[in-house]
Image (cartoon, grey):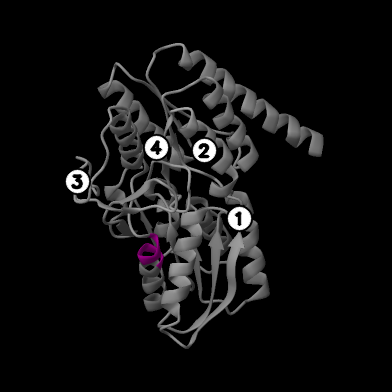
Amino acid sequence: MKLTRFATALAGVSLALGAISLAQAAGDVTIVTVVKVTGINWFNRMEEGVKEFAKENPGINAYQTGPGQADAAQQLKIIEDLISKKVTALAVVPFDPPTLEPALKKAMDRGIKVVTHEADNEKNTDVDIEAFDNTAYGASLNEHLSACMHQEGKWAVLVGSLGSRSQVQWADGGIGNAKKYPKMDLVEPKLETNNDGERAYEVAKEVLRKHPDLKGFQGSSSLDIIGIGRAVEEAGLQGKLCVFGTGLAGEAGKFLESGAVTGIAFWDPKIAGLAMNNIAKMLIQGKTVTNGMDLGLPGYNKVTVSKGPGKGIIVRGAGWIDVDKSNYKQYAF
């Protein structure tokens, strides 16, 4: 079984590297978006933004790639190959930011522009772009959860990966917010689901078995909500538990309809893909992002800029979208 999984993972990396080789020959200026994992709706939606950017900029070879499963080593291998091919810029959504530091430093040392997303702890990046303040976002999710729970009872937090900076910040923001309510009892903090819906389902089932009087879940990965929703429906607890987290309306809609998920929040991955590539283009042109700048994209009309942990900057947009059963159909992704 281990050999089979290894062969599958190796095949996934080989396919991604083959796509890189084909696309690399298409132009001199190349911006490559490297995501945590391919084949899930979140990053399929982001790829729509990358493709739109490519269409709007015919002189730039822009495309998206990533590993076939959420794995830091596979993502690192893809980035190292892109560096060896001397791409012009990298737009990266790191699975585990510290793992990529040596490779991204190498990229920057070789003159490759680096833009990251969901990684405000990344030192070796020119610009990290965030859709919003991550701690405030997590606190907002928890405020909805707390209100649903009437500020009391047992609750649990799931994260896709303890290495995923933004997801941990959302979880910590929620945990910090709940401290305002002394009757909120966090029984399972930051359970890891590996950015996998099936794993999230198994984790949620185990939490419900262990805590039959649980009152709420807060999820982080967009797949956490899917797994939690499945587990809640299977247990027949629709409408009896409060469930909030990051998700996409297209995936979570059926669980919002059934009551297995109470509410979700998100930012549009397509817009994030456009933002990363637009900033990469600016860097290639010798420009940078300044405080208050309008990037010409919804949610990024008046960005704030602060110093990052390395030589680069952190650019933050403003706002996120809160969705429940009443309005999720407005968002067709």
Find out whether the residues at labels 1 and 2 contact each other: C-beta distance under 8 Å.
no
Whether residue 1 is visible here, answered yes or no, is no
Q: Earlier in the sequence, mark 3 or mark 1?
A: 1
Q: Write the residue at 59% across / 42% down.
A: 70
Q: CA distance from mark 1 to mark 4?
A: 22 Å
Give the number of the mark in front: 4 or 2. 2
Label tally: 4
| Whether residue 284 is situated above or below residue 306 in the rendered picture | above
- 323 and 63: which is toward the camera: 63
Percent coordinates x, y for residue 37 in the rendering: 54, 39
- 316 and 86: which is toward the camera: 86
Q: CA distance from mark 1 to mark 2?
A: 29 Å
- 206 and 306: which is toward the camera: 306
* Disc ID at residue 50: none
Q: CA distance from mark 3 to mark 2?
A: 27 Å
Q: Write the residue at 18% across / 44% down.
A: 294
Decide whether residue 107 is among the magenta residues. Answer: no
Q: CA distance from mark 3 to mark 1?
A: 37 Å
Three-letter code, disc 3: Met
Q: Write the residue at 63% across / 28% down.
A: 13
Q: Earlier in the sequence, mark 3 or mark 2?
A: 2
Residue at the spot of label 2: 105
Residue at the spot of label 4: 46
Percent coordinates x, y for residue 185 in the rendering: 53, 82
- Relative placement, left or right, of 210 versus 50 is right
Three-letter code, disc 1: Thr
**Callout 2: helix, strand or loop?**
helix
Quarter of the picture containing the C terminus is top left
Residue at the spot of label 3: 293
* Disc ID at residue 193: 1
**Callout 1: helix, strand or loop?**
loop
> Label 4 neighbourhood size at 10 Å, few (<14), some (14-19), many (20+)?
many
